[in-house]
Every structure is written in structure tokens, then in C-alpha cells.
Amino acid sequence: MENFKNVDDVLEFVVTAEQKAFNLYTKLATQSRSSAMSSVFEQYAGDAMRHKMQIEKIKHEKSFSIPEGLLARLKPNDYIVKNEFSRDINYIDALSLAIERAKAQYKLYIHLSEHGHGDDEKKMLHSMAVSVADHNTRFEIEHDAYIASLN
């Protein structure tokens, strides 16, 4: 993938990542073995949609900037998960994909929150990083429990 040219490229990348997260979490909600986990995935899908809307707002308002030095260092491939989501993905593979994506999103949100310009936006991005880290922990717990149930 081509490098980011400007802050809009970065923010559009994040919007796309959040849409992919929404699609994956919605799929996981339908595949879960328990209604409690289905509810968790539905909540995470809602979080992803809120994150997407927040980023779209920042993009529209042009209220966030990235220093040239950071923009040059941000490489899209550092935040792309090689495995792709498909409608026929099984539950354990979808959980593994969710874990990988959450880690990539966390890393990007932390980089942006630490180095971007715009105090409110930086706080929001840090909050989103924390949210994604929480999701990742829950995915790992569910993944481990599912594997243990197979043995």
C-alpha cells in the first residue's frame, strides 16, 4: 500500500479499519455460542461505529494535524492485518483476526494520540486505543476459552 500523503489519508484509513471491525464484530455476534458473548460482540460493533463517526467528524472539521516527521514515519503496512475477513470465516479464525486487528488499531491510535496536534482529538484517540485494548483482551479470553473447550 502507498504511504500516507496527508492527515486525511490517515483518517480515511482509520475509518475503513473501523468499518471492517464493525463487519467482523457483527459476524462474531451471529456465530457466538452464547448470548452473553453475542451481546459483547454487538457492543463492540457499536463501539466501532462510534469510533468511525468520531474519526469522520475530526476529518470533516479538520481539527487534527500530524507533524510532517510522524506522517513520513507512519506506514500503512504497519497497521494492516494480512488475513482478510470473509463471510464464511469460522468462529476461531474470526476471533484470531479480531485479535490481530485490535492490536494494529491500538498501535495506530497510540501513535496518533502521542504525536498528533489537537488536545481534544488526542484525548479521544487515546480513549479509543484503551477501548480497542479492552476489546483485544476480551477476544483473547474468548479465544482461549474456545480452544480449551475443544480439548
Image (cartoon, rainbow, N blue to C red):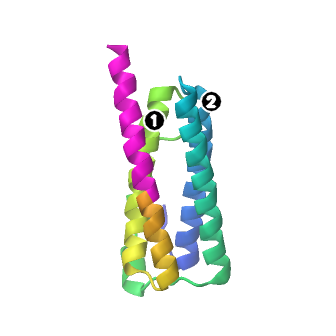
| Quadrant in the picture for residue 68 | bottom left
- Comes first in the chain, label 2 or label 1: 2
The residue where tag 2 is placed is 30
Q: Position of residue 96 (x, y in %)?
A: 41, 36
Write the residue at 36% across / 35% down: 141
Can residue 39 be seen?
Answer: yes
Residue 12 against residue 137 in the figure, above or below: below
Q: Which mark is residue 8?
A: none
Which label belongs to residue 95? 1
Residues in magenta? 131-151
> What amino acid does circle 1 point to?
Leu
Q: Where's residue 114, x and y in %? A: 36, 76
State the predominant SS element of the stretch in magenta. helix
Secondary structure at numbered mark 1: helix
Q: Is residue 4 magenta?
A: no
In which quadrant is the C terminus drawn?
A: top left
In the displayed structure, 95 sits above or below 61; it is: above
Q: Residue 147: within the magenta? A: yes
Please determine whether, in this image, residue 128 is positioned above or below residue 58. above
Dot 2 alpha-carbon crowd within 10 angstroms: few under 14, some 14 to 19, many 20 or more: some
Residue lying at 58% horizontally and 54% vertically, measured from the top left: 48
Q: CA distance from mark 2 to mark 1?
A: 13 Å
